[in-house]
Image: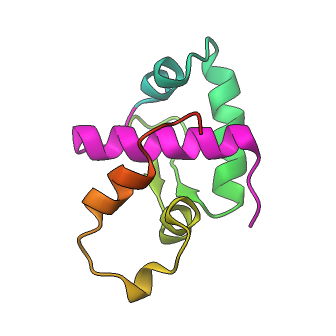
Amino acid sequence: MELTFTQRRVLKALAVLTIKRGFPPSSRDVCDALNISSTNAFVEHARRLKSKGAIQWLERKARTIHLTKAGWELLIGEDLTRKRSDISAEVLDHLRFIDE
């Protein structure tokens, strides 16, 4: 599955914000992290990520965006079934910079 540069930035922001806070971010949280002024722009990217299977999301419900296994694998770059269950440190290391 291929992601655009912006879709990858949104996916990284979702992962980083979720890990740092311990719960899913709001649409506004992601927009603020990425300096996106319109939540509509974020919604369009989130819909595309959902259609690609990278996230699960109940639209119009607060804080319901979750990365799927496929979404985490896209960010980390390998199959998570072969990894230990505790990946937080490695995820943070791979996702240090949202704009890369």
Residue 26 position, x and y percent, is 41, 30
User: What residue do we see at 42% from left, 86% from top?
Assistant: 81
Q: Does residue 100 appear to the left or right of 21 in the view shown?
A: right
Q: Does residue 77 appear to the left or right of 96 in the view shown?
A: right
Residue 51 position, x and y percent, is 71, 57
> Can residue 64 be spotted in the picture?
no
Place residue 35 in its image quadrant.
Answer: top right
Question: Which of 63 and 31 lies nearest the eye of the viewer?
Answer: 31
User: What residue do we see at 64% from left, 46% from top?
Assistant: 8
Question: Magenta residues?
Answer: 1-25
> Can residue 46 be spotted in the picture?
yes
Q: Is residue 1 above or below residue 96?
A: below
User: What residue do we see at 26% from left, 40% from top?
Assistant: 20
Residue 25 position, x and y percent, is 38, 35
Question: Which of 93 and 69 lies nearest the eye of the viewer?
Answer: 93
Place residue 83 in its image quadrant.
Answer: bottom left
Place residue 17 in its image quadrant.
Answer: top left
Is residue 52 on the magenta stretch? Answer: no
User: What residue do we see at 64% from left, 54% from top?
Assistant: 50
Question: Which of 22 and 93 lies nearest the eye of the viewer?
Answer: 93
Q: Does residue 60 appear to the left or right of 64 in the view shown?
A: right
Question: Which of 91 and 32 lies nearest the eye of the viewer?
Answer: 91
Name the quadrant of the N terminus: bottom right
Is residue 6 on the magenta stretch? Answer: yes
Residue reaching furthest to the top: 37
Residue 44 position, x and y percent, is 72, 35
